[in-house]
Image: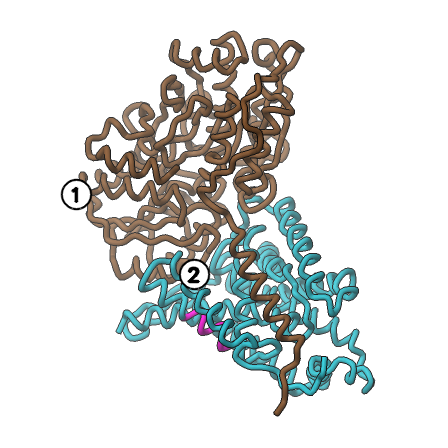
Amino acid sequence: MSTSSKRPRTLVAVGATLALALSGCGARAGDEAVAGGTSAAPSCVDTSGASVKLGFLNSLTGGMAISEKTVSNVLHMAADEINAGGGILGKKIEYVQEDGATDWPTFAEKTEKLLTQDCVAAIFGGWTSSSRKAVKPVVEKNNGLFFYPVQYEGLESSPNIYYTGATTNQQIIPAMDYLASQGVKKLFLAGSDYVFPRTANAIIKLYAAELGIEIVGEEYVPLDKDDWTSQVAKIVAAKPDFVFNTINGSSNVGFVKAYYDAGLKAETTPIISVSIAEEEAPAMGHEVTGQYASWNYFQSLKTDTNPKFIESWKAYPNSSGVTSDPMEAAYISLYLYKALVEAAGSFDVDAVNAAAKAKPITFDAPEGTVTLDGENHHISKPGHIGKINSSNQFDIVWSSDKFIEPDPYLEGYDWFPADIRKQLTDAAG
Amino acid sequence: MDALIAPLLNGSAQGALLLLAALGLSLTFGQMGVINMAHGEFLMLGAFAAYLVQQVVTATDLSIPVALPVAFVVAGLFGLLLEITVIQWMYRRPLDTLLVTVGVSLVLQQAALQIFPSQGVPVEKPGWLDGQLTVLGYGWPLRQLFTILLATVCVAALSAWLRYTSFGRRIRATVHNRDLAETSGISTRTVDRLTFFTGSGLAGVAGVAASLIGGTNSQMGAQYIIPAFLVVAAGGIGQLKGTIIAAWAVGVALSFFAYWTTGSLAQVLAFILVIVFLQLRPQGLFTVRTRSLA
């Protein structure tokens, strides 16, 4: 009887162990990363000189670098613009760029470092909700300030965080209003499997019941998987009028391709997305043309301030050449901070928070004049629905009749019951 | 009927892509004992090669057929470079190759992020892959049929090469007993290099197939490496037929689980199945019969 060699056996064991170990090391969404140190030290921020230090915290390496690199670049552009205009309270911005490396504990550690060693007056950045939730306990403990620029699932507010992206009532709800106005009766939900799509879909289902829209299916695929073939087969069978897409990242490319391959067309079964913007569309090829997205800003938006923003960005080194909603929200965040500090007359966190409450702080953003809500730290935004054209820009097909006030806990919507609000808030941690 | 046909066909296509990604690994890992964690990035190189070919050959009907050999050569050459500069110093030290190639994979990912648009690039599907084939009432996307055909051609070419050419015999001799092969006058160095070139090149071909299914960006390789390793391990080291059966089984299992449950749960269930199988049969489906005492 022949024997199998030892070497291959060992290799199998090594290979399998390795596979297990690595698959366990992916993104641990919802991890509460708590950085070291126990007591809040008094702030070491020094603004007595000619400059003020600010921290930029974006993933420049790892999976999320795909999206966050652009946010980092646009923050640099905004800082350069503000410096050229004389700085904040006459002080030049001196920024410290840190890499969050797509790793949520790293976000917590770098926040701690920026606050206690670099002594920055405020931090700007983050993209995923997991990164924001890693930063939150650290800025709260050290009484720092964090400006978060991406649309998210809401149900959160913190005295130490300002949110310049949309909350659900500024992106998800306008999208549902649009669908209702189009006479949609059957809706299919497709999302990546993490906190934003799960929470968004919980809200969508409640509002759909209110609007008389039937949910004919709900599918999730892990964030790092591109193959949507099996799920798209279910969409074909369910025959919805519209698909609500809360997929994030490169998985969207796989979804759109599988959709097109299965013979589903934008003309007959359109998709409405909340994370495909001008930056993402070019990577999807012609398959995405004709599909819809709900945002608060589009490059094609006609406002007084937008042309200058687009021009500055196109001329900026390392520019991707197109502007998008998360970029614009990041751009707003630095200017909003400037406005807050100037209203407070100080860089002190408590003074800044007091100024936010004292009177409405506004900024003439590329999306229009946004107003900060001093209580929940979110900003008012217009809702727009765009349709992707063949040059990967959006033709705006619907807009909210006025700017939508932020309502992160959806307290103004009586179809959103208090017990579900509590349950979702607790689940989101 | 539809409830069985759709997941079966989709799963077969998923398995074919998995097989394409695992085929090169079954050569480099199975035949040479090198744990190449940068294999996923060679796949990425193939996808980017397809994109670059499309910039030159603008007729999409032609560009993908042209891209396949180009991707094979590009990824193969990168593999050769890796073998000459790094791997050749590490034979018989599988853990060291693992660590070094994880580093190489990170370097390649970051390089791709710096060179190409960070959101990735579009690879356009040829027009002749538009449309569906109706199989018992299910509209099966032609692109999936293409993936299966491509995998079949690659497997046939590889096994013919291993079985009928003198080079293939030398590879098999080296796998069975390296020392004896050397004593018989086989240059195991040359065998190693060509094997590594071919294994990496096959990753490039898999990259072209992957670029038609998902995104072409710096992160794309990462999602294939773990399933590909599991497939090779489950199939049995150094056994092409084991890899083929394992890839197909995992693909179909993934698809049926996804059909019955959700996409996320399917990933968990399918890989639990593989792990349980490896617990029961650590040597995989098939084993190499050898008289080696090593």
Write down the chain letter for disc 2. Answer: B
Viewer-side residue, A162 vs A304: A162
**Chain A, colour shown:** brown
Q: CA distance from mark 2 to mark 1?
A: 34 Å
Q: Specify the segment rendered in magenta.
A: B243-252
Give the quadrant of the C terminus of chain A.
Answer: top left
In the figure, is residue A333 to the left or right of A72? Answer: left
Residue visible at 58% across and 50% down in the picture:
B218
Residue B56 can be seen in this image: no
Write down the chain letter for disc 1. Answer: A
Instruction: Tell me which chain appears cyan.
Output: B
Secondary element under disc 1, as helix, strand or loop, is loop
Picture coordinates of residue B174 (x, y %)? 73, 81
User: In this figure, which residue is indicated by the disc labeled 2?
Assistant: B267
Residue visible at 79% across and 74% down in the picture:
B189
Above/below status of A289 relative to A91 = below
Q: Quadrant of residue B77?
A: bottom right
- Secondary structure mostly seen in the magenta stretch: helix
- Do dots 2 and 1 share one subunit? no
User: In this figure, which residue is indicated by the disc labeled 1?
Assistant: A212
| Amino acid type at mark 1 | Gly
Residue visible at 56% across and 51% down in the picture:
B219
Residue ranking furthest to the bottom: A1
Q: How many marks?
A: 2
